[in-house]
Image (cartoon, rainbow, N blue to C red):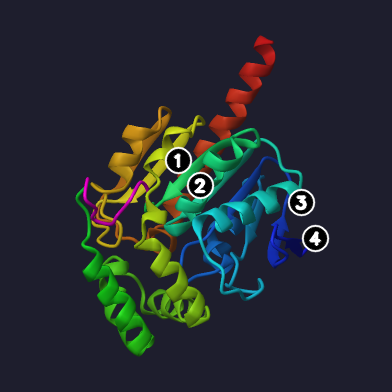
Amino acid sequence: MPYVLSHDGLQLHVRDLGEGMPLVFVHGNNLDAVTWDDLATSLLAEGFRCIAYDQRGFGRSDMTGRFSYDLLAADLDAVLGALDLREVVLVGYSMGCGAISRYAARYGSERIAGAVFIGTVTPCVVQGAQRDGIPVHELQQVIDATIADRPALFASLLDAFLEPGTSAEMRRHVLELSLRPPLASAIACARIGISEDADFSEDLTAFTKPLELIHGDRDSFAPFSLTAARTAELVAHARVNVYEGGNHGIVFSMKERLRDDVARFVRGMSLRDERLASAR
């Protein structure tokens, strides 16, 4: 099933490989499902079923002018429903963590065994009347610079996105990958990211499953103190896993450690299910 139909009629491209406990990967803005190639391939070898889909407007999914976190959550629900997935571990990166949070709040956790948030943007990175954060005008400047010259801006941000010592080849790969999505989709998602739609504080309080928060302590795109640290305070069964020296791009530059940590978390879900089944 290479495509799943969204609730509003879009075709969402899905990669579904392997057998075993299912993992569904949800990518961030300026990216597509290729984000997960290295991590998913290594987890396939660990005996897991790995499913990654292109979010609306990205990769090989249909283009659209309609974006909101409610729609992104509905797309995730469509993927899980079409594949009839149960006891699934959701693995989100950056904006993808917001889509998972909204999904759990809107559709419940019946299908979910747990989740892994990598470089999460939850509960909110934007400054508001009742919270500190990154000022909206600074984020708007980034959007304006993206519209003006996306290649130049993204190239200038690589040093803050990836750790020192990251190979030139990986830096080139990340830059090429981030420039592939249509500019219109990237800008639309950036705009909902600086709106009140991107406040997941209430959504997270409804998340009742185990949650692993993997975050770089040098992440300047989604600072740890605004995101993973606060998410852990809102989710009852959350565990924080800090990558010392890690920036926002740890999904690319620290993939071996991610493989081990995600595999450990998923195996923990399997053992938990076995204990619950034996207790019944």
Q: How far separated are the C-alphas under marks 4 and 3?
A: 9 Å
Q: Which residue is mark 1?
A: 203
Please tell me which of labels 4 and 3 falls first in the chain. 4
Q: In the rendered view, would you say 37 is above or below 115?
A: below
Q: How far separated are the C-alphas under marks 1 and 4?
A: 30 Å
Q: Are marks 1 and 3 in contact (CB under 8 Å)?
A: no
Tell me which residue sits at (31%, 81%) in the image.
144
Q: Are marks 1 and 2 in contact (CB under 8 Å)?
A: yes
Q: Amino acid at mark 4?
A: Met
Which numbered circle lies on residue 102?
Answer: 2
Q: Which residue is mark 3?
A: 82
Q: Which residues are magenta?
A: 122-130
Q: How far separated are the C-alphas under marks 3 and 2?
A: 19 Å
Tell me which residue sits at (54%, 53%) in the image.
70
Taking depth in this image into account, of 26 and 195 the one nearest to the observer is 195
Q: Is residue 119 left or right of residue 261?
A: left
- Name the element at disc 1: helix
User: Residue at the front extreme?
Assistant: 129
State the quadrant of the C terminus: top right
State the quadrant of the N terminus: bottom right
Q: Which residue is mark 4?
A: 1
Q: Are marks 4 and 3 in contact (CB under 8 Å)?
A: yes
Q: Position of residue 183 (x, y in %)?
A: 47, 81
- Name the element at disc 3: helix
Q: Position of residue 110 (x, y in %)?
A: 64, 33
Q: How far separated are the C-alphas under marks 1 and 3?
A: 24 Å
Taking depth in this image into account, of 25 and 139 the one nearest to the observer is 139
**Dot 2: few (<14), some (14–19), or many (≥20) neighbours within 10 Å?**
many
Q: Amino acid at mark 2?
A: Arg
- Name the element at disc 2: helix
- Viewer-side label of 3, 2: 2
